[in-house]
Image (cartoon, rainbow, N blue to C red):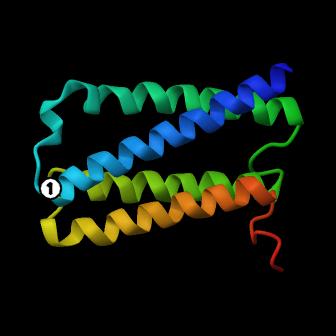
Amino acid sequence: MEYFLVKYLHVTCVLISVSLFIFRGSLALSSRPWRQWRVLRVAPHIVDTVLLGSALWLAWRIGQYPFVNGWLTAKVLALLAYILLGMRALGKNTPQSQRLPFFVAALLSVGYIVGVALTHSSSWGLL
């Protein structure tokens, strides 16, 4: 039961985190000053901290770890790509013309992460 509660918390945090990213990204793409709202600056950090904590607990609980198990390594590397691409998409110094490609690439990274999570395979079980 405990495992499923933490897994549910993890999936809920994923949905909230990605939703907040899409919302902030949409505002950034339309040149809206989203940074003026404190909740949009603070909430993602809180949600992502809970998300990371639940991910670490789940990895420990199932006995599979990044850099030992390929699918978790793929998730961690894709997460790093998502973070870097997301930083560029939402960055203050990113030119408006470059925001959309970084935003789309970040969302593709999230899609890959979700696919790996669902299949426990870095190739989504296609190979």
Give the position of the N terminus as an image quadrant. top right
Q: What x and y, as percent, mark residue 112?
A: 61, 64
**Res. 10 image quadrant:** top right
Instruction: Check the image and name the residue furthest to the bottom.
Output: 127
**Res. 8 image quadrant:** top right
Q: What x and y, as percent, mark residue 43?
A: 36, 27
Q: What x and y, as percent, mark residue 70?
A: 80, 59
Residue 62 vs 25, above or below: the answer is: above
Q: Which residue is mark 1?
A: 93
Count of numbered circles on the image: 1
The answer to whether residue 51 is left or right of residue 30 is right
Instruction: Check the image and name the residue furthest to the top.
Output: 2
The answer to whether residue 66 is left or right of residue 91 is right
Give the position of the C terminus as an image quadrant. bottom right
Q: What x and y, as percent, mark residue 48?
A: 49, 33
**Viewer-nearest residue: 40 or 123:** 40
Q: Kindly identify the amino acid type of the residue bearing the numbered disc 1.
A: Asn
